[in-house]
Image: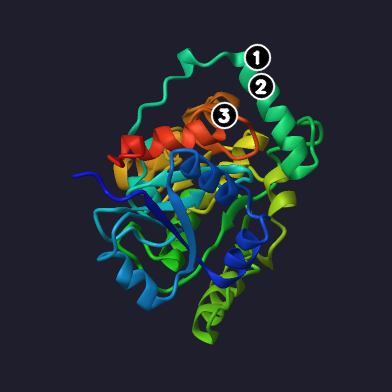
């Protein structure tokens, strides 16, 4: 039996306020798409009690970034850059549909991809061309959170990733970038500061990603979006964790440590083609007329009956 035509969208307080004001573009698009199919759309706070109740309510549930923990739920997550979004059956990016797909650069128009990458490089990073971009700088390690812990999707803890990189890059300088949005513990800061103090190759800073991407030799990270952003500057990357944008990057979990660094040096990723494929061709662009049909197509692929 078909589900009643009800969609509940669960949002954090700030996003909920924006959505109710009509200022959250993708939510407005989702609402219009479902209302066009005769649905009632409700905007709700993603409190623990509300989320728990969603499993027993009639209709469908869409969670902003949260785990779609029951059969009638999906998650909505930004595809790294506004206004691109994904609707998925898992909140884990490495389980997204695009992560399972095969990227074939031969099928991508190189001129279209280059023009797209140029436009978005200018929009995101205020850099229309690659003029002034070099590979004369350090190995860039953008750090995320939980620096002392190895999580299930990682081959090494972040601090052990740093140590492994030290062993792999010879005499190249290394730039450790602490994330400006993270609240690091004294133990975490002490650990990375100790590594930096003991190795004259290492510099430690907070933030500064855009400039680092312009000058670094390559990027090493667990799964920071900085690696994907590095493709706009034609910088290769080594990954120590699982993620959805792995296709053109050397991944330690797949290749092993030594081979991952070796392959990174030998490969020349199809930077522009990959960005075009991964973002433009495999995400929902919320600010175009076809967004509503793309949203409906996406949820239908996940089994929702929205006709």
Q: Quadrant of residue 24?
A: bottom right
**Mark 1 crowd level (few <14, some 14–19, many ≥20, 10 Å Cα):** few
Q: Is residue 99 visible?
A: no
Residue situated in front as seen by the camera: 299 or 268: 299
Establish if 205 lies above or below 8. below
Indicate the position of residue 61 as horizontal and vertical percent values.
37, 56
Q: Residue at x 32, y 54 (%)?
A: 59
Image position of 275 with respect to 203: above or below: above
Q: Residue at x 25, y 66 (%)?
A: 56
Is 105 above or below relative to 36? above
Residue 278 location (% of width, % of height): 50, 33
Q: Is residue 9 shown left or right of residue 3? A: right
Mark nearer the N terminus (1 vs 3): 1
Which corner quadrant of the image does residue 261 belong to? top left
Alpha carbons under labels 2 and 3: distance apart: 23 Å
Work out how far the residue at label 1 is from the one at label 3, CA to CA, in angstroms.
23 Å
Could you say which is closer to the camera, residue 257 or residue 178?
Answer: 178
Select label 2 or label 3 by which is in front.
3
Q: Secondary structure at mark 2?
A: helix
For label 1, the SS is helix
Q: Which mark is residue 290?
A: 3
Quarter of image, res 104: top left
| Dots 2, 1 in contact, CB < 8 A | yes
Mark 2 Cα-neighbour bin, 10 Å: few <14, some 14–19, many ≥20: some
Residue of label 1: 111
**Where does label 2 land, which residue?**
114
Residue 32: x and y, percent? 55, 43
Mark 1 vs mark 3: in front? 3
């Amino acid at each position: 039996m078909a589900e009643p035509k009800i969609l509940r969208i669960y949002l954090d307080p700030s996003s909920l306020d924006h959505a109710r004001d009509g200022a959250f573009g993708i939510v407005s698009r989702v609402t219009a798409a479902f209302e066009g199919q005769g649905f009632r759309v409700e905007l709700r706070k993603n409190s623990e009690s509300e989320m728990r109740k969603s499993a027993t309510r009639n209709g469908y549930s869409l969670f902003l970034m949260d785990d779609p923990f029951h059969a009638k739920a999906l998650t909505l997550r930004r595809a790294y850059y506004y206004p691109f979004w994904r609707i998925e059956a898992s909140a884990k990016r490495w389980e997204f549909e695009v992560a399972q797909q095969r990227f074939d650069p031969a099928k991508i128009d190189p001129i279209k991809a280059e023009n797209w990458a140029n436009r978005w490089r200018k929009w995101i990073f205020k850099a229309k061309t690659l003029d002034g971009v070099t590979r004369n700088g350090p190995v860039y390690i953008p750090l995320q959170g939980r620096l002392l812990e190895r999580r299930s999707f990682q081959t090494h803890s972040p601090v052990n990733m740093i140590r492994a990189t030290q062993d792999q890059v010879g005499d190249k300088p290394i730039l450790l970038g602490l994330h400006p949005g993270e609240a690091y513990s004294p133990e975490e800061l002490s650990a990375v500061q100790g590594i930096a103090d003991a190795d004259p190759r290492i510099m430690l800073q907070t933030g500064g990603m855009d400039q680092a991407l312009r000058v670094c030799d390559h990027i090493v990270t667990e799964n920071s979006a900085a690696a994907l952003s590095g493709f706009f500057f034609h910088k290769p990357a080594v990954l120590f964790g699982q993620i959805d944008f792995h296709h053109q990057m050397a991944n330690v979990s797949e290749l092993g440590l030594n081979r991952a660094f070796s392959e990174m040096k030998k490969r020349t990723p199809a930077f522009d083609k990959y960005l075009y494929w991964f973002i433009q061709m495999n995400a929902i662009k919320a600010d175009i007329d076809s967004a509503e049909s793309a949203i409906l197509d996406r949820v239908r692929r996940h089994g929702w009956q929205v006709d």
